[in-house]
Amino acid sequence: MSVVLVVNSGSSSFKYQLLDVETERMLASGLVERIGEPMGVSKHTVFAPSAEGATMLDATYSRELPIPDHTAGFAVMLDAFAENGPSLAAHPPTAVGHRVVHGGARFFEPTIITPLVEINIADLSVLAPLHNPANLAGIVAAKKAFPDVPHVAVFDTAFHQTLPPAAYTYAIDAELAASHRIRRYGFHGTSHKFVSEAAAAFLGRPLGDLRQIVFHLGNGASVAAIDGGRSVETSMGLTPLEGLVMGTRSGDIDPAVLFHLSRRAGMSIDDLDALLNRGSGLQGLAGVSDMRDIIAGVEAGQTAPTLAFEVYVHRLRGYAGSYMAQLGGVDVISFTAGVGENAPEVRAGALATLGFAGVEIDQERNATRGRGIRVISTDSSAVTVLVVPTNEELEIARQTLAATGG
C-alpha cells in the first residue's frame, strides 16, 4: 500500500486527505479551521470500501477546542486519526504532499522540501502574499508531525511552466518586468494536468496526440490550452486575478480603469485590490457569487443575474475561440470544478456559438447529471466535449509518490 497524506494549508485552516495511491481510494479527509481564534474546529471523516471496492462515507467526527497555531492543528489531526481511525500505524504515510500556490519560474515539477526549498517558497511570497506564507506554515507544522517521511511541494504554477515565451511575456518594459519577476505564471495547474490526462485515458487516445481546452470553473476560474499534454496558454497571469469572470474576481479589465478610479474616486491601492479580488465578478454584477444563485435569478427573470450570466458566458466563448486559434484546432473540450461539473447552462452557453468549429452539444446528455467522466457532445460532433470531475488531491498524491521514487 502506497499511502500519501495530502495537505492544503491556509492562513487560519488546513484541509487534509489520506489516500491509498495504488487503489486511488481515499481513507480519510478532514478540515482544521479557525486556527488562532478563541475556539477552533476540527472535522475528521473516515471512509471505508464498499462491497464493490469503491470509497464510501463511514463516519464524520467533529471537535471544538482552542487551536492556537498550525502545529497545534496537526496535533489535533493526529488525535483524530488515533481516536477515530484509520490507524496511521496500520496505514503509515510514505510521504506528505503539500499544495503550494506559487512556484514562480523556479519550480516546474514536484519537489522534495528541503530548507532551501522552504526559503524559496518564502521568497516567492511576494508573488502570492495571501497563499505562500500559509502554505509554508503548513509545511513547517507537518514536518514536526511527520519528521521521518519526505515532504513534497506540488505547485499550482508548475504545469504551466511549459508556456512559450510569447504566451507568458507581458508587453511592458523588459528590464522592469525581469527585475520584478512579472510574467504570466498561471494557476490551477494540478487540476488542468489531472483533467487533461483523465480525458485522454477515458477516450483511449494518446495524450500526446490531443489538442485540449480545459475549463476549470469554480469560485476561481481558469482555462488552459493543452497541446500534447503540455500547457501552451492559460488565462490566469502573474496572479489568479486575470482571465475569466469569477465568483468575486473581475478577470480581464482595462488597466486604465484603475487609474480612473484612483483619480476620480480617490481609491487607494488597497481599495482597488479589494474591489477587483473580492468585490467584482458575479458578486459585483449581481450581489451574489454562487452560480446557483445566478441561475436561479436568470430563471426568475431578474435583470442583474441575467446580465452577470451573459457576461460570464461571453468571456468563456471568447477564450474558447482564442485557444482554438492558438492550438490550430481542438480535439477535446473539458469542463471541471464546481461550476463546470454542475452547471449545464454554463456549458451550453459557453459553446453555443462554436458550431462553426464542429462543436455540437447533446442537450439531453448535457442536462443529465452523473458522477464520473461523461461525454456531453453529440456522436457526430467533430470535437468531443466532456465533463471531467477533478481530483487535485489525488494528483498531488500521485506527484508526491513519483517525486519520492514510489
Image: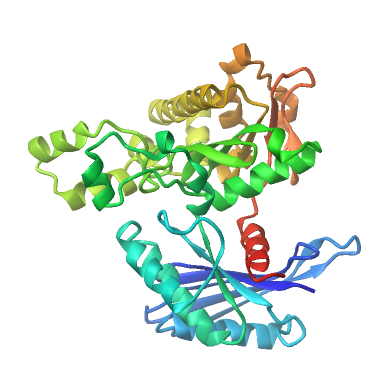
Relative side of 28 to 257, left or right:
right
85 shown above or below 58? below
Indicate the quadrant containing the N terminus: top left, top right, bottom left or bottom right: bottom right
Vertical comparison of 360 with 300: above or below: above
Q: Quadrant of residue 198?
A: top right
Report whether residue 321 is seen: yes
- The residue at 62%/83% (across/down) is 80
Q: Residue at x 22, y 38 (%)?
A: 173
**Which residue lies at the image location 73% right of the left edge and 80% below the top edge?**
86
Q: Residue furthest top?
A: 356
Total marks placed: 0
Q: Along the line of sight, which residue is nearer the eye, 265 or 139?
A: 139
Dividing the picture into quadrants, the one containing residue 145 is bottom right
Q: Is residue 64 visible?
A: no
155 relative to 374, above or below: below
Q: Is residue 183 above or below residue 386?
A: below
Q: Quadrant of residue 308?
A: top left
Determine whether, in the image, residue 395 is placed left or right of residue 126: right
Name the residue rendered at 14%, 45% in the picture. 267
Indicate the position of residue 207 as horizontal and vertical percent values: 71, 40
- Camera-side residue: 212 or 402? 402
What's the coloring here? rainbow
Horizontal and vertical percent position of residue 393: 62, 61
Which of the pair 364/236 is nearer the observer? 236
Location of residue 394 in the rendering, given as x and y in whole percent from the top left corner:
67, 60
Question: Residue furthest toward the right?
Answer: 51
Task: Specify the quadrant that holds the C terminus.
Answer: bottom right
Across and down, in percent, residue 287 comes to 36, 40
